[in-house]
Image (spheres, rainbow, N blue to C red):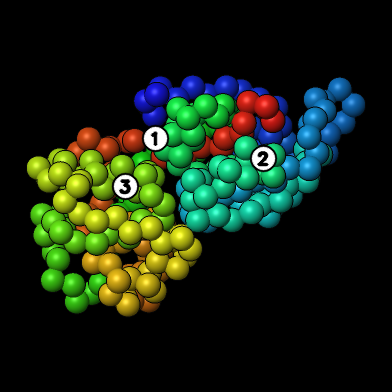
Amino acid sequence: MNIRSFRIVPVTVSVIMALATGCGTVSSTAPTAGQPDPGEADITVAAIPATDLAGLYIAQDQGLFARQGLHVRIEQIPSSQAIIADQLKGQVDISAGSYIAYISAQAAGARFRVLAEAPMLRPDTRVLVTTANSPIVAVDQLVGKKIAVNATNSIGTLLIGVLLSDHGISPARVRFITDQQGFPAMPAQLQEGAWNAAFLAEPYITLAGEKYGDRVLADLDQGSAVNFPIDGYVATTAWA
């Protein structure tokens, strides 16, 4: 299955509206007679803590879910890959993260539906960073180096692989290291020297620059990856 053809199936209108837009287009009034019943009133959404999914957190903070008759609990996760096993067991209703893990799971027999798209790749949203004093100043200097990602076989490894390939470098010539704690811990751990570069999303790109002086080695929104689909809100077909 190709990411660009991963099918989006509309489900439960009030849930999708809130998840997809976060604010602005969701009704600000409580459900009244004649409005669709939300069906599942208590919903757990597992999401990576990144600005891509700001709409989800805004909707929660502004009470937009509650106004649609929903009680939503947001569980922060390091990657979509980290939550799939729990989601297949029914412990999580909706998860929000990159599509790679869902496609891999579906290829192995799981069944998911994309309820709503989240952002496409844009400039300054996914980058590779190095420390302020790193000798690495060009992509071709990554050969033989360690690169930290928030999950193995994830959107990070895919985008970095595209970047390397566009520069004539096989992705097999770098070593990907998974940080199980995800983006929030990665800027600090990069300073300890366990890796040579790290894959980051906002707001952790800004944090790494402001707090540690880290440099952006490469913006991943380039070459073959421009406008690439990144995240979505996904549920199992059984839950949907």
Closer to the camera: disc 2 or disc 1?
2
* Residue 229 badge: 1
Q: Residue furthest right?
A: 33
Quarter of the picture containing the N terminus is top left
Q: Are marks 2 and 1 in contact (CB under 8 Å)?
A: no
Q: Tell us which disc is closer to us: 3 or 1.
A: 3
Disc 2 to disc 1, C-alpha distance: 27 Å
As shown in the figure, which amino acid type bears the numbered disc 3? Thr
Given contact means CB atoms under 8 Å apart, are the residues at marks 3 and 1 in contact? no
Specify whether residue 138 is in view: no
What percent of the width, then of the height, locates residue 60?
68, 51
Q: Relative to 45, say whether 114 is above or below.
A: above
Q: What's the distance in space between the residues labelled 2 and 3, CA to CA?
A: 27 Å
User: What residue is shown with label 3?
Assistant: 157
Residue occupying image coordinates x 62% and y 31%: 236
- Identity, as a three-letter code, of the amino acid under mark 2: Lys
- Local secondary structure at mark 1: loop
Residue position marked by numbered label 2 in the rendering: 89
For badge 1, the amino acid type reads Pro
Q: Residue at x 44, y 34 (%)?
A: 104
Q: Position of residue 223 (x, y in %)?
A: 20, 38
Would residue 122 be found to the left or right of residue 236 on screen?
left
Quadrant of the rendered image containing residue 91: top right
The spot of residue 94 in percent (x, y) is 63, 39
Horizontal side of residue 165 vs 34, given as left or right? left
